Amino acid sequence: MKIENLKDWGFDLKRPWIIAGPCSVETEEQLLDTSKQIQKLGINIIRGGVWKPRTRPDTFEGVGSAALPWIQNVKKETGLSFMIEVGNPKHVEEALKHDIDILWIGARSTVNPFTVQEIAEAIRGVDIPVLVKNPINPDLALWIGAIERISRVGISRIAAIHRGFSSFQNTRYRNLPMWSIPIDLKRNLPEIPMICDPSHIGGSRDLIFEISQKAIDLDYDGLIIESHRDPDRAWSDAKQQITPTTLALIMKNLKYRTPTSEDKDFITQLEGLRDQIDHIDKELFEIMAQRMDIVEEIGLYKKRNNVTVFQKDRWKEIYETRRLWAAKLNLNPEFMADLFKIIHDASIRRQEYIMNNPIETTEDEKHEFTGEHPDNV
């Protein structure tokens, strides 16, 4: 897969790349005023929703094609570049006809391979950048698949947008960041530029700076932030939009860090600390192997005494005590509880294997439950 570096995209980009603009293009006057204010911040790419995929009907779904001539006029007056979301081949055709500079594929489209393929075919042979948002649900394969479909029709200026994931959990985020998923995407596609969308992750203007800083700390290539001249009166997603003035403050207060340093003392210190981490991790693996050996003994003992594998009271005890131990050691109790849930699940699977197989087994056979060796858990 050929993916061009952002600096070669031809938009005079400086890292981190900042994109801003209203959630929806509402009127030509609103778009022009907002764009001019954003331009004063040194931002040269404006985002704006033309077609808005909404969860339920009878809500504002964007001005539609009527907004495209307005964008053309604003482009002529300001010299700015524009990017919009496309959800089907007709959108692509209309966008290209009206000189849109960058396209993005939204989360609701990314989740459907048929839709992505139709969009990809509509831009085959066209030299235009395409940004792909993560799917609504936390599915890394779908995200990668959408990027691959766009790449295979000849698009090399591709970036990923991390906008968070839907969840039934009650959290302070509109969409859970689940930072590990975009990090995994970068592991699979190291060359892909990664853009964070703090507006959709947070769903509240109060969270935009915090999320933006986190993305910068994780070495993201840029940010896409919803900005409106009068956010409280915006026709869609008012709570997550900010004024250009607030955007300027966020940009000013963000702390930028380099991925590495050439300082010899820094390198020596870092290598020493990493050696300590490696040593501790090795000990953790050895301890986990010892734990799983004991789990096997417990499984054999339960089998001989015809006792069920899962015991609710014991799991409740583990869950509560590990959270307490974590708090006493200044560790995050929620993280440690989640970690021990994974360990407990692996232990249950190991004991289920023992329950359903002869006691006399080889060491290799013992570790063939669910295709995972317990030391890897």
Image (cartoon, rainbow, N blue to C red):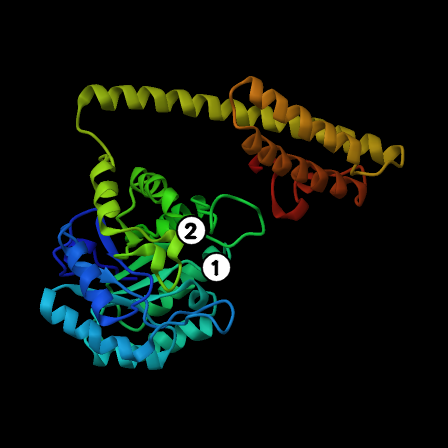
Residue in the picture at 78% in, 36% down = 312
The image quadrant of residue 261 is top left
Residue 145 lies left or right of residue 191; in this view the side is: right
Residue 347 versus residue 130 in the image, above or below: above
Q: Which residue is mark 2?
A: 203
Residue indicated by mark 1: 136
Three-letter residue code for mark 1: Ile
The crowd level at tag 1 (other Cα within 10 Å; few <14, some 14-19, many 20+) is some
Q: Quadrant of the C terminus?
A: top right
Q: Report x, y in % for residue 231.
A: 32, 55
Examine the image and state in which quarter residue 206 appears. top left
| SS of the residue under disc 1 | loop
33 vs 280, nearest the viewer: 33
Q: CA distance from mark 1 to mark 2?
A: 14 Å
Q: Nearer the viewer, residue 272 or 92?
A: 92
Query: Which residue is at 23% across, 34% downward?
Result: 257
| Nearest the eye: 188 or 321 | 321
Q: Secondary structure under badge 2? A: loop
Instruction: Verify CB contact (< 8 Å) between mark 1 and mark 2.
Output: no
Eye-nearest disc, 1 or 2: 2
Residue 346 is situated, as x and y percent measured from the top left of the image, at: 65, 39
Tell me where residue 151 sits by quadrant. bottom left
